[in-house]
Amino acid sequence: MIPTEEAKRILDTAEMIYSADEMADTVMRMAADITLALSDRYPLVLSVMRGGVMFAGQLLPLLKFPLDFDYIHASRYHDNTTGSQIEWKAMPSENVQGRVVLVLGKH
């Protein structure tokens, strides 16, 4: 974890790439596309812990169709800057076999 003052400095000097309105519009378009593709499929939606939580919180209320929701948690970095072997901290509690699965994460 970086020190609080360093985190504040990074936030204060960060360049805004997209505004909140642009991001909200993008999430709305994604929700419409996902609804078109998956509304009749009863998908399992998996949020990747940490990276996908904020996005899932914005997207899920816009999906007006039946779905199951769960999360996964995996780590490759273990406090390093380069990845290594994946360590599964939480697998989905739902069986994914035969399911349409939508994974929400960052990148």
Image: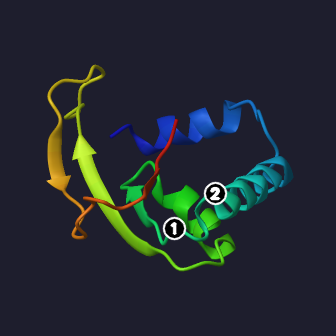
Residue nearer the viewer, 101 or 17? 101
Q: Tell me residue 90's x, y (percent).
A: 19, 58
Q: Residue at x 42, y 58 (%)?
A: 100
Image position of 14 with respect to 72: above or below: above
> Tags 2 and 1 in contact by the CB under 8 Å rule?
yes
Toward which corner of the image does residue 47 lie, by quadrant?
A: bottom left
Dot 2 crowding, Cα within 10 Å, few <14, some 14–19, many 20+: few
Please state if 93 lies on the left or on the right of 34 as rendered: left
At label 2, which amino acid type do we have? Ala
Q: Secondary structure at mark 2?
A: helix
Q: Which of these two is toward me, 36 or 22?
A: 36
Q: Kindly identify which residue carries mark 1.
A: 41
Read off the residue under disc 2: 37
What amino acid type should be assigned to the residue bearing mark 1?
A: Arg
Q: Camera-side residue: 2 or 27?
A: 27
SS for callout 1: loop
